Image (cartoon, rainbow, N blue to C red):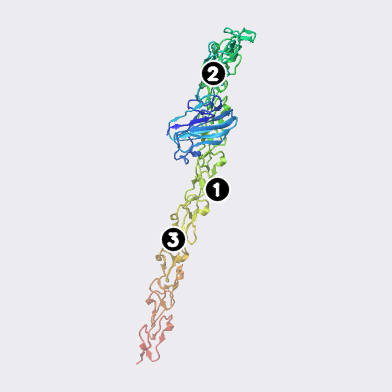
Amino acid sequence: GGAVLTLLLRVQSDIRYVGQTSVNITDFGPRDAPGTFTALVPGTPDCRIGFDGAIGADGSNCPFQMWSVFGNVSIRIAGAYSFCTLSGDGSRLYVDGTQVVDNDFLQLSTERCGTIQLGTGDHVVYSEGWSWDTTASLTATYQGPDNQKIPLGTKCTLCELGKYLSGCSSISMGTCLPCTVCPSGQYNSGCVGISSGSCQTCSTCPPQSIMSGCGGINSGNCVSLCKVCPSGQYQVGCNRTYNGSCVLCPSCLPGQYSFGCGGNFSGQCILCEPGKFRAGQGPLNSLECQNCDSGAANGANCSGCMNMSTQCSLCHAGTFQTGLGGINCTLCNAGTYLTGTGMFSDTQCSPCSPGSYQTGTGLADSTRCLLCPAGRYQTGLGMLHLNNCSLCGVGTYQSGLGSGNCSKCVNGKYQTGFGMIEPSNCSICFAGTYQTGLGSVNCTMCPVGTYQSGSGMFDLANCSLCGTGTYQTSFGALNVGNCSLCASGRYQTGLGMVNENNCSMCISGTFQSASGSTNCAKCAAGTYQTGSGMSTQGDCVGCFAGSYQTGTGMQSIKNCSLCMVGKFQTGFGMQDARNCTNCGVGLYQTGSGSLNCTACPAGTFQTGLGMFSPINCSLCYAGTYQSGYGMIDTKNCSVCMAGKYQSGLGMSEQSQCSLCT
């Protein structure tokens, strides 16, 4: 809705205030509740730090604009006071910290009021309002007991007897003007507050009496017949037997003029109205008072104005006056200050420096600018509110007051919150992580294949590579124990490996029974191994009987050498040719890789070792025979019996011996 924040104060009757964004709010009213208020402060609400309107508690529907106004009221009459607010979308009002009005329910353009008992003295009032619209206005009026609405803006002047208030507005305290001067025979009735009064005819007295004292603001009364004095004189000494005498009205001091002299009333000397002076003496009227220069003002309490230089006071520090005849000086806006006196332009008000702000008006020097608290910074000039001090962002902190920037967390640390005030709010990167940059919101995990056991590390080089024989598949490993060992049957010679596939399988002819190895063991001599990834020595196969193998790490049965002809071998896994045994006497072997030897046939014998053919078996001589196998000597050949003979060689049976004829 349209954004309107209206602050209203009712005292005894309907008393209201209206502030405008172009008007300094400096008073709650001319007579009943004077006080001092800041200018209306527009700004963007910071929903991150707890905006609690009916919508936007989580920042999802943050209003476009927020306004606030605060200050104090001076209560002269104790009693019940009514405060009201009116806003486009929501508003609140507090008195002395007590919430009096809660208009936080999006009751668009609906006035809500609250009442509180207040004693005499100063009371702090704060009100704020917000809108989900970009348009903004702020209006209010003050209505005093005289039922005259006055725009809020400044404190209205309290006028003394014989004067009334004129021109009190949002930009002026008003001027006390003389009550209407009535002709002879009349007096001013009702000159009070903001009314100049009206001329009423003096009452008609009975015979033998005369109206006395009717004039000015006095209605007079009937007395015995007294002398009527001309203008500029008044009558004294009139009684029942004497009609009195006329004397001159008294002369007033410089800076004053005479008011009400006439009849039997000598009148009184009235000060020139604020902003004016009068150098001469005499019973002159108010028209003789002249305006003070710009940059100076004459307050209501000024007495005896002798000349412009001594009685038109210079505007004090924190204020200025641009026009002639000023009755007061204008306060420098919130967010600014002015150290000199007699200043005549708002451009002479210096803005509060970066890192500071000021909600009040009329500051006399830069020390009155409030420093942004720790955990916040501010880069602009002339800021009006604490909300203009931004919270330090993530990854930063600020421990000092009045800063224009925030310090970044050092490398090796991070920080995720807003508004941090100490370096200790920067958390140390935990084990398994590091951080190389300044002002970081998180830490980088060590990559796969590495680990890191310390804290506060600030470089990738602080992440140690997993050693040989290991690998590591996860980010942010904390210690060397997070590096996995390559399984048995595998090996790995590099650093920083990232998965199990980086562990190579042992090739054929090798094995590895331990985990985390950097190499594989070769199968022993006399064995071979055809597969890969073998994990025990038992996976190495022994060379078969009739063979041997002298080398290590053999990958095939073909690597087993056959025992030579004339030799045999019955065991497995033989490692040397010497494990092949020569065929014994009476034996031979024609093939290689044999498990045994062949016996020489019947009718033969063989006396040598390592024979590799049947021809190595010698035939028994003529006249002999031999029926057994594997005979080792000629003695094994039997001689034919007496009476028998045998002419052939290699006979195997006795029956082959013939009878002699």
**Could you classify mark 3 by the number of other residues whose Cα lies within 10 Å: few (under 14), some (14-19), or many (20 or more)?**
many
Q: Which mark is residue 454?
A: 1
Give the SS element for disc 2: strand
Query: Is residue 95 visible to the viewer in this orientation of the structure?
Result: no
Give the SS element for disc 3: loop
For label 2, the residue is 191
Could you tell me residue 83's position as x and y percent?
52, 32
Observer-side mark, 3 or 2, equals 2
Against 364, is 537 above or below?
Answer: below
Could you tell me residue 151's position as x and y percent?
49, 25
Could you tell me residue 503's position as x and y percent?
45, 56
The three-letter amino acid code for the residue at tag 2 is Cys
For label 3, the residue is 533
Q: Is residue 103 left or right of residue 272?
A: left
Observer-side mark, 2 or 1, equals 2
Question: Distance between the Cα atoms at labels 3 and 1?
Answer: 37 Å
Q: Is residue 171 left or right of residue 122?
A: left
Q: Are marks 3 and 2 in contact (CB under 8 Å)?
A: no
The three-letter amino acid code for the residue at tag 3 is Gly
Q: Earlier in the sequence, mark 3 or mark 1?
A: 1
Query: Is residue 196 visible to the viewer in this orientation of the structure?
Result: yes
Q: Earlier in the sequence, mark 2 or mark 1?
A: 2
